[in-house]
Amino acid sequence: MANKPQDSCTLKVRVQPKASRNQVDGFEDGTLRLRVTAPPAEGKANAGVIALMAKALGVSKSRLEIVRGHGSRDKVVSIDTLTEQEVRRRIDAVVKD
């Protein structure tokens, strides 16, 4: 198993599919809460999660990967090139806007 680079992290994410709008709600009990308009069918909600997180974090979609929870609202997302501290800082900035 490869070692995780220092400038990467994993986050627990709770997703609400079929929401009225795409939105980052921030952290609640250590879990990032997201709303995506895509339905939870054929991977559309998962693609919406990756797109929304990439936009919020200012990184390429290729830097994000759902590592667990492909068929669940509760997911674990790996983020390459950012530390957990930097991810939290960027999410907090998006939520405050």
Image: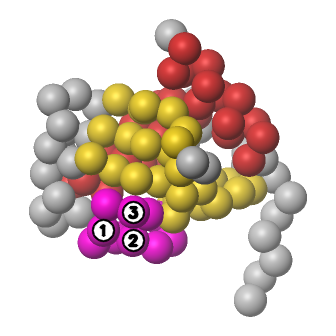
Residue 84 lies, in percent from the top left, at 74, 47
Left or right: residue 22 versus residue 77 is left
Hey, what amino acid is under mark 2? Gly
Element carrying mark 3: strand
Residue 36 location, quadrant? top left
Residue 19 lies, in percent from the top left, at 18, 37
For image coordinates 28% across by 72% down, the residue present is 71
Residue corresponding to mark 3: 74
Q: Is residue 36 above or below residue 67?
A: above
Q: Quadrant of the N terminus?
A: bottom right
For image coordinates 75% across by 36% down, the residue present is 86
Residue corresponding to mark 2: 69
Element carrying mark 1: loop
Hey, what amino acid is under mark 1? Ser
Residue corresponding to mark 1: 72
Element carrying mark 2: loop
Classify mark 1: residues with Cα within 10 Å, few (<14), some (14-19) or many (20+).
few
Hey, what amino acid is under mark 3? Asp
Magenta stretch, residue numbers: 66-75
Left or right: residue 25 versus residue 70 is right
Residue 83 is inside the magenta segment: no
- Label 1 to label 3: alpha-carbon separation: 5 Å
Could you tell me if the residues under marks 1 and 2 are in contact, i.e. CB atoms within 8 Å? Answer: yes
Could you tell me if the residues under marks 1 and 3 are in contact, i.e. CB atoms within 8 Å? Answer: yes
Please say whether residue 63 is visible from this viewpoint.
Answer: no
Residue 72 is inside the magenta segment: yes
Residue 90 location, quadrant? top right
Classify mark 3: residues with Cα within 10 Å, few (<14), some (14-19) or many (20+).
some
For image coordinates 30% across by 68% down, the residue present is 72
- Label 2 to label 3: alpha-carbon separation: 6 Å
Given residues 28 and 9, the one toward you in this image is 28
Label for residue 27?
A: none
